[in-house]
Amino acid sequence: MRITLIIIIFFVIGALLIISNNDLSMREKKNVSHFTELYIDWMNQIYINLQSISGNVVKLNWFPFNGTR
C-alpha cells in the first residue's frame, strides 16, 4: 500500500512540475493536449531510463570473488 501511494505521489508531483515549468493553464483545451503530450513523453523517458538501469544491473557480476579467476 505504501509503495502504491509513493508511486502515485511521484506521478502527481511530476504532473504539477510539468504544469508549472511550462506555465500551462489547464482551463484551455490546447494546454491540456500539450500537457498530455509532455506527460507521456516524461513517462516514456522514465521507462527508457528504467530499461537502461535494469540492463546495467543484469550485466553486473553478482557472484562473490573467491580468489580464483
Image (cartoon, rainbow, N blue to C red):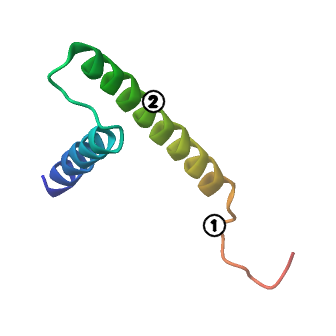
Q: Percent x, y for residue 13? A: 24, 49
- Between 19 and 1, the residue placed more toward the observer is 19
Assess disc 1: are there few (<14), some (14-19) or many (≥20) residues with their C-alpha within 10 Å of its C-alpha.
few
| Quadrant location, the C terminus | bottom right
> In front: mark 2 or mark 1?
2
Q: Is residue 1 left or right of residue 15?
A: left
**Helix, strand or loop for disc 1:** loop
Q: What residue is shown with label 1?
A: 62
**Helix, strand or loop for disc 2:** helix
Residue at image position (35%, 44%) is 21
Mark 2 or 1, nearer chain start: 2
* Amino acid type at image mark 2: Asp
Q: What residue is shown with label 2?
A: 41
Q: Percent x, y for residue 6? A: 21, 54
Assess disc 2: are there few (<14), some (14-19) or many (≥20) residues with their C-alpha within 10 Å of its C-alpha.
few
Query: What is the total number of numbered labels drawn onto the structure image?
Result: 2
Q: Is residue 57 above or below residue 4?
A: below
Residue at image position (18%, 27%) is 26
Give the residue furthest to the top.
Answer: 29
Give the residue furthest to the right.
Answer: 69
Q: Residue 18's quadrant in the figure?
A: top left
Q: Is residue 64 above or below residue 67?
A: above
* Amino acid type at image mark 1: Trp
Q: Is residue 57 above or below residue 35?
A: below
Q: Residue 31's quadrant in the figure?
A: top left
